Image (tube, rainbow, N blue to C red):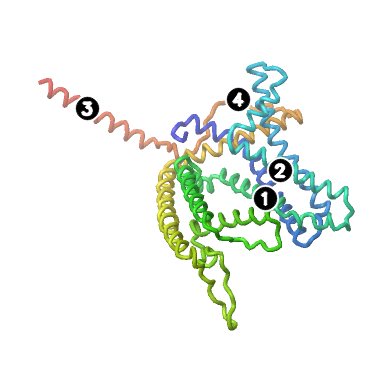
Amino acid sequence: VMDNLLINAILCQGWEKAGRFFYFGVMVDVLCVIILVLVGLAARFEVFPSLKTLLPLTFFLFYSFLELFSEVFHVYNSSILWTNLSSKTVGSATYKCATRSLFALFEWFMVGYQTLLWTLLMWYWFTLESASDERRKFLKHHPIWNAAFMGFKTNQVTLKLLAVRRIGENVLPAYRSIFNGVTMTFLFFLLQQVFNSFLVYYSIPVDVFDGEGFSSPYRDFENVFMTFVTMFRLDISGDFDIGDLDGQNQYIDNSEIQNAKEDKYHHRGICFMYMVFTAFIGVGWLNLLIGLLNERYNTFYTKRDHLFETFRVVYTYKGLSVRSCLKWIFCWSEQEKKPPSAFFKYKKSKFPLHTPKEIVLQAQASLLKKFQNDVAADKKSE
């Protein structure tokens, strides 16, 4: 992309028109994160968010809908203009925008999740009394709703910041070194090895979860889940305890903490299993993953300009779509005050212009080389 002067000029011109909408969207997302922090604080202090906190969420939800609607609007207009489709064009345009990529699907999921969370908060605000325990402790008892949205939103803001040149050109090679076919295939293989270790450990009759006072279905599920967590800790982070693997707990004797008692049936087998999985997964495969990431990063770093422009063109398209939609809503018109003129705007560091002196020197060198070639050809002919 960066080697073509015309494409570089088009991208720069498009970003000049879309950049203001991009930065406004980033500002809206940052404010949304701040509001979510206030919602989290309300849950921590067992109070329900005030209406002053919830009303900005309405604006943020509206702007998120506007961004998606502008893309659908753009695709719909293009379909009507070029293919003259039927009334099903709106549905097909929506489907095309939502399934364009995994990134687009993630954004549509984000808006749906944000709508669900906003609906729940508003419903609890208007239907329950302010002094009721159910309303006051709703976020305290269901913190994952807000925490999950906080995680999604902060990651969305982080990804948007990669469209800033100073950040994107340096970080995108690392981002692409993880999210590419080779690395993801290796990570899938690595997770298979972790799952295999989980199956090996689960075949040993160890109760990782005590489960006293809980029903049998919950106890069985929690035991399976905690068994997988235990092996994940052992394989990936190296965080383990032989007593935990044995299903035994430490105990206090004479006011001192003693190691967990060894199980006489499977203690040595678990020790051998720990050594094998630590050596092959924790030392072997994880170090290979580090080497692979280093090699991928070096490869993508040489293409960082191309990666950045390819990444930013997505937000250029989104900004231009919002701009086009707002022009249609508010009936804006752009009238040229000056006669139209053609020009190029591009990144000069990628296409340096030669000074007149350098042009003369290059011409002289070219003529001298041509003269030398002619003399050499004459000598060969003689």
Decide: is 368 above or below 230. above
- Tags 1 and 4 in contact by the CB under 8 Å rule? no
Residue where numbered disc 2 is placed? 113
Q: Secondary structure at mark 4?
A: loop
Image side of residue 54 versus residue 363, left or right: right
* Crowdedness near tag 4: few (<14), some (14–19) or many (≥20) residues, C-alpha within 10 Å: few
| Residue that carries the numbered disc 3 in the rendered image | 371
Q: Could you say where residue 83 lies in the image, as x and y percent from the top left?
A: 64, 17
Earlier along the polypeptide chain: callout 3 or callout 2?
2
| Proximity of marks 3 and 2: CB atoms separated by less than 8 Å | no
Disc number for residue 340? 4
Mark 2 burial class by Cα count in 10 Å: few <14, some 14-19, many 20+: some
Q: Are marks 3 and 4 in contact (CB under 8 Å)?
A: no
Q: Amino acid under label 2? A: Tyr
Mark 4 or mark 2: name the one nearer the start of the chain: 2
How far across and how far down the image is residue 191, in percent? 50, 48
Mark 3 and mark 2: Cα distance apart in space: 73 Å
Looking at the image, the residue that sits furthest to the left is 382
Asked if the residues shown at circle 1 and circle 2 are in contact, with their CB atoms under 8 angstroms apart, the answer is yes
Q: Amino acid at mark 3?
A: Phe
Vertical order, 58 against 382 (above or below): below
* Amino acid, disc 4: Pro
**The disc labelled 1 sits on which kind of residue?**
Ala
Find disc 1 in the rendering and name its residue: 148
Q: CA distance from mark 3 to mark 1?
A: 73 Å
Name the element at disc 2.
Answer: helix
Can I make out residue 206 in this image? Answer: yes
> Disc 4 vs disc 2: which is toward the camera?
2
